Amino acid sequence: MPSSMPRRVWILACAALLAAFFGADAAFASEASLKLPSFSTPLFFGGSTSGASILIWGLAVSALGLVFGIVQYTQLRNLPVHKSMLEISELIYATCQQYLITQGRFIIQLWVFIGAVIVLYFGFLVDDPDMNFGRVGIILLFSLVGVAGSYGVAWFGIRVNTFANSRTAFASLRGKPYPTYSIPLQAGMSIGMVLISVELLIMLGILLFVPGSFAGPCFIGFAIGESLGAAALRIAGGIFTKIADIGSDLMKIVFKIKEDDARNPGVIADCTGDNAGDSVGPSADGFETYGVTGVALITFILLASHDPTTQVQLLVWIFAMRIMMVIASLGAYLINGVIQRGRYADADHMNYEHPLTFLVWLTSIISVVLTFIVSHLLIADLGDGTLWWKLSAIITCGTLAGAIIPEVVKVFTSVNSRHVREVVTSSREGGPSLNIISGLVAGDFSAYWMGVVIVVLMGIAYGVSQQGLSVLFPIAGSSIDASPIFAFGLVAFGFLGMGPVTIAVDSYGPVTDNAQSVYELSLIENVPNVKSELKSSFGFEPAFDKAKAFLEENDGAGNTFKATAKPVLIGTAVVGATTMVFSIIFLLTNGMTTDLDKLSLMHAPFLLGLVTGGAVIFWFSGASMQAVSTGAYRAVEFIKQNIRLEGVEKASVEDSKRVVEICTIYAQRGMFNIFLAIFFGTLAFACIEPFFFIGYLFSIAIFGLYQAIFMANAGGAWDNAKKVVETELRAKSTPLHDATVVGDTVGDPFKDTSSVALNPVIKFTTLFGLLAVELAVELSKSHPGLTAALAAGFYAVSAYFVYRSFYNMRIEGAATK
């Protein structure tokens, strides 16, 4: 807990929380009532195979995926590398380690808040004779497993990427472009396979080995834990990386030095930030997204489908889809490797985006084909015998989205796109001003077209759901059809269906970015007798000019594919959160049979909730960027005072570590304020009125979708406009380059701080909201006057941290005194 937080506020907040929860009578059990059916009955392959047997095969596939990821990791570690480059990558890893250790302690502090709510709810309020403190402890354990999962895959991602960055830089010296493509992709695939395999192992373990009467709460605890870990790492990592990036980049303008100049003490922090923001964040985020969409569907199936046989068939089917898509991703990667090696292994030039695009489409097509085949084998007898292909068609909408969305993103962010070229052109005469305006235009246009794509895909899923899927979710005494909501959840599920490849092309970016930095920081061209050393030790003559060109061009491709993964993740968060919100609606309306009139704009609290969600999204965007602004100011201040350009080749390790420390401090300060504002805000809005809260959840999802897409793609356009100037126009250290650097520094917190962090914020709010709204409903029954007082108290605490997120994070200087 930061020392600047007044002790009185802390005590009052905790006292309010304890008084509210201990003062309530036994609540209706919802999470506690999520009972899994038995998977032991033979229902598949003509009644010869049980669901448990299929899920056990899933454990085996996940274990093989984990082995594959570890083997790739080992191969990367054993690749040749020059000691000058190895020293830099190990220094980067050392600073990353320190950052992660610090963040781990911080996450545990935040977990205490969540753990308190879990204990109070399941330990004291749940009306379930089987619920005891032993079981509460197990739920807490699974929440810690979720935190550890997000944290662990993030650590693994950093270790893989810091192996790959120096090996990529070294491989570029051979004068061929192919290794600079294959090594980052290998690293990304290692991360993707480990991430998805670990996630599947945990979720399948709960399904198979936790008693069905208790598995529901364990899934909820696991999902909340991984969501907390991802939110903390994504938000703090996004703040950290952009403080470092801006602090480093501005030196190019101030001192007219080159990119990644070794004398700049901000460069090591920038490299650390590339991993903290672009590796740690996406790894934890992908782990959480994959899990939360699964938990959302599990919750919905258990609440909306009342037939145990149907529940088993649907649950086994969705996990079979995930198992199949792991196999599809691995197969596509291996096939793509053979094809691209044949095309480019001896080539002197290559377009780095082409093989990555080919991989994404190949994976999508293989996944779609296998979806229909496996669905027919497993659920051909579900319903009237036609539902297998209808469900396959719906999940295909999501699988295709994983390939279509990157194509749309490239229209606005690729180095070859007309929007990026427009940003460059406008910068020639208009300088930073028109550069920034053109980037905003790209972001705005992208949000429109991305919205159209998502609506079309969800619309197709809705249309298919109307062809008889309602039999799966009958609602007694109601004309409401729940099948479209299940269809939307399947679309979100399909978004990440080819998860290993989606994560791989996203992780490609931080490796290419770091590889360029490692090359410059190693000063390998200045190493005495380096050419003869490389010839004698490694068997080749170095091609320095080609190496630098390859690394810069590949960084542009990395920028593009980092940009393509962001809308996939945010789209999954929004569509998946919608499914979870409808699960909450099921609980509030007694299975869609009462209070349906309150889900209307004519119900004032619902409308007010819609308005409130938008306000929170815009506050969050500002709060996260404010932390970047203040931290970057301090970093720039320190670097200006300590940079030495004469008589030294490299900045001191002490100065570099001090910049890392500055980035960490402001990342944690910003994250602490943001988390507690969201935590207490969620409790407050749930206490105001349940349907106000439903409107709020819908609103943050919709506003968050468009805000995230706009910011991510505007930032991507600015980033690659700078890359065009550097690689194609060769115009570094010119006014045009200065203009694009300014635009890129504006885009940095847009694309890598605020936009990407909206994804875990939406999911965490929805998952934690599931607990919060149930507590509020029960309080309103037993203590009608208390909920209003608690809403006011919780909101006062939340507003305090909203206030702190700006006024305690300001840049204190002459202009603010």
Image (cartoon, rainbow, N blue to C red):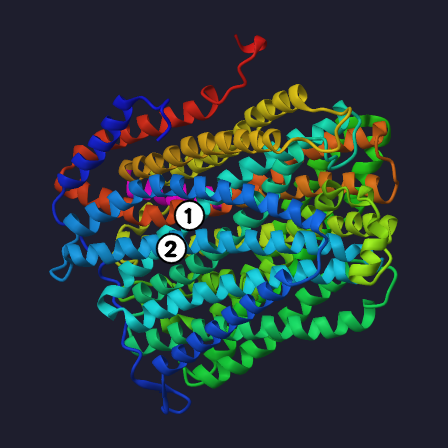
Q: Position of residue 164 (x, y in %)?
A: 65, 56
Query: In this image, 305 relative to 285: left or right?
Result: left
Instruction: Please provide the residue range marked out in magenta.
Output: 689-704
Callout 2 crowding tier (Cα within 10 Å): few <14, some 14–19, many ≥20: many
Mark 1 vs mark 2: which is more N-terminal?
2
The secondary structure that dominates the magenta segment is: helix
- The residue tagged 1 is 229
Dot 2 falls on a residue whose secondary structure is: helix
| Residue 78 figure quarter | bottom right
- The residue tagged 2 is 146
Question: What's under tag 1, amino acid-wise?
Answer: Gly
Q: Is residue 700 magenta?
A: yes
Dot 1 falls on a residue whose secondary structure is: helix
Residue 162 or residue 646, whichever sits in front: 646
Is residue 749 at least partly visible in the picture? no
Query: In this image, 492 relative to 715: left or right?
Result: left
The residue that appears at 46% across and 75% down in the rendered structure is: 320
